[in-house]
Amino acid sequence: MTVSVGCATALPSATDVANGLELMAAADGQLYVAKNEGRNRTRSAQWDEYSATQGGSRTGAAP
């Protein structure tokens, strides 16, 4: 049996996550990255990184 895992984290005091669905989408995206890399992989992203690459709703983010 093999396992691939994707996760995303956000600190409430440091980020502006509009809703849990956005955080879930970030984790889901990392899961697919892990699966594409092969077996037994883990991938994670902090909300700041994901938001910057996806045009997320973080307040004060550069355009």
Image (tube, grey):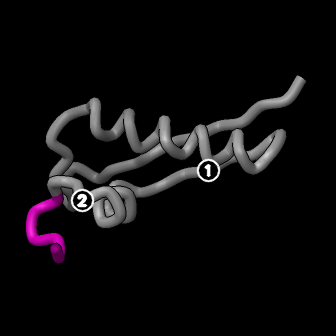
* Distance (Cα) linking label 2 and label 1: 20 Å
14 sits to left or right of 27? left
Tell me where the magenta segment starts and ends, as one range.
58-63
Which residue of the protein is positioned furthest toward the left in this rendering?
59
In the rendered image, residue 61 lying in the magenta stretch gets the answer yes
Q: Position of residue 33 (x, y in %)?
A: 62, 47
- SS under mark 2: loop
Say what amino acid the circle numbered 2 marks: Gly
Mark 1 residue crowding within 10 angstroms, few (<14) / some (14–19) / many (20+): some
- SS under mark 1: strand
Q: Position of residue 38 (x, y in %)?
A: 81, 45
Residue 32, by quadrant, is: top right
Judge whether 12 appears above or below 5 on screen: below
Quarter containing the N terminus: top right
Numbered label attached to residue 43: 1
Residue at (22% x, 49% y) in the render: 12
Say which residue label 2 marks: 55
